[in-house]
C-alpha cells in the first residue's frame, strides 16, 4: 500500500518523507550531499559514498574472478 502520490509523475510512496525526498531530488534537482574532497554534490548519501570511493580512494575491493583486475564499484 502506497498512499502518498507524486502529483508530477504519479510515483507512489509508503511514507510522506519518501515522497518529499523524491520531489526534492527528482523534480527540483536538489542535491544536499557534498563530497568531502571536491565540489561534487549528490541527491543521496550512497551517491557520495560511491563517488568518494571511486574517485578519491585508492581502495578497490571488488576483484575480477577471471583476471587480476580490481575496481571500486561492481559493474
Image: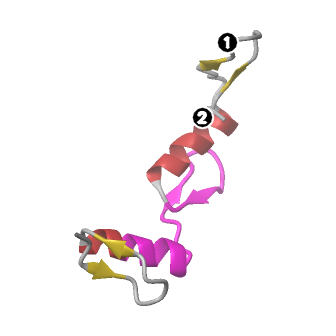
Q: Residue at x 69, y 38 (%)?
A: 55
Q: Which residue range is magenta in the image? A: 20-43
Quickly name the residue at label 1: 65
Q: Is residue 75 above or below residue 17?
A: above
Rendered-image quadrant of the N terminus? bottom left
Specify the color scheme. Answer: secondary structure
Locate residue 10 relative to residue 63 in the image: left or right. Answer: left
Which quadrant of the structure image shows residue 69?
A: top right
Residue furthest toward the front?
1
Identify which residue, 24 or 37, lies in the foreground. Answer: 24
- Mark 1 and 2 residues: CB-CB less than 8 Å, in contact? no
Q: Residue at x 59, y 20 (%)?
A: 61
Tell me the crowding category of disc 1: few under 14, some 14 to 19, or many 20 or more residues within 10 angstroms, Cα based. Answer: few
Where does residue 4 sit, x and y in percent of width and height? 28, 79
Locate residue 14 relative to residue 7 in the image: left or right. Answer: left
| Numbered circle sitting on residue 53 | 2
The verdict on residue 53 being magenta is: no
Amino acid at each position: 500500500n502506497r498512499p502518498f502520490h507524486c502529483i508530477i509523475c504519479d510515483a507512489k510512496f509508503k511514507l510522506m518523507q519518501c515522497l518529499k525526498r523524491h520531489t526534492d531530488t527528482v523534480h527540483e534537482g536538489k542535491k544536499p550531499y557534498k563530497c568531502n574532497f571536491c565540489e561534487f554534490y549528490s541527491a543521496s548519501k550512497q551517491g557520495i559514498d560511491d563517488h568518494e570511493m571511486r574517485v578519491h580512494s585508492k581502495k578497490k575491493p571488488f576483484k575480477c574472478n577471471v583476471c587480476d583486475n580490481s575496481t571500486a564499484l561492481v559493474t
